[in-house]
Amino acid sequence: MWTKNNIPDLTGKTAIVTGANTGIGFETAKALYEAGAHVIVAARDEQKAHTALKKIESEASGKGTLEVGLLDLASLEKIKKFADWYSEKHEKLDILINNAGVMIPPPSKTDDGFELQFGVNL
């Protein structure tokens, strides 16, 4: 069985985990941090992302580093802002975990007018 213990040393690698403030995204960010990666905790709520970052640091004996990235997948403008921010700070991306998503939300739309589940999860 494959577990987080099978993750190789990720020192020098940079990872983005979307929806990293809770659930599977949180656990994935923590595992990558423990393996030595520089992990961008990407979430739409900055306070929740900072709380998750502090929780990872307190729970894990990681050798990696953590950074918060504000990313709201329901807005193309905010996605571009995140991409520009990332490009200014980082030269490369080694790992992308597209974890964030919504499932069966009430009828609603993204900032750009797309049905929410389609717009966020695409």
Image (cartoon, grey):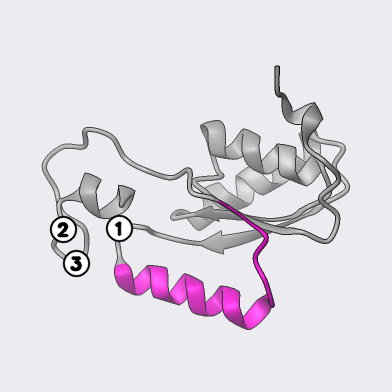
**Secondary structure character of the magenta stretch overall:** helix
In whole angstroms, how far apart are the C-alphas of marks 3 and 1?
8 Å
Image x and y of residue 106, in percent:
15, 37
Crowd class of label 2 (few under 14; some 14 to 19; many from 20; radius 10 Å): some
In whole angstroms, how far apart are the C-alphas of marks 3 and 2?
6 Å
Q: Residue at x 70, y 23 (%)?
A: 2
Q: Which mark is residue 74?
A: 1
89 is within the stretch colored magenta:
yes
Crowd class of label 3 (few under 14; some 14 to 19; many from 20; radius 10 Å): few
Q: Where does label 2 land, which residue? A: 114
Say which amino acid is labelled 1.
Ala
Q: Residue 112 carries which label?
A: 3
Q: Residue at the far top: name it.
A: 1
Query: What is the secondary structure assignment of the residue under circle 2?
Result: loop
Query: What is the secondary structure assignment of the residue under circle 1?
Result: loop
Q: Does the residue at mark 3 contact the one at mark 2 (Cβ under 8 Å)?
A: yes
Q: In this view, does 76 lie above or below 109?
A: below
Q: Which quarter of the image is occupied by the N terminus? A: top right
Q: Does the residue at mark 3 contact the one at mark 1 (Cβ under 8 Å)?
A: no
Say which amino acid is labelled 3.
Asp
Crowd class of label 1 (few under 14; some 14 to 19; many from 20; radius 10 Å): many
Q: Which residue is drawn at 87% across and 37% down?
A: 61
26 is within the stretch colored magenta:
no
Looking at marks 2 and 1 on the same chain, the residue that comes earlier in the sequence is marked by: 1
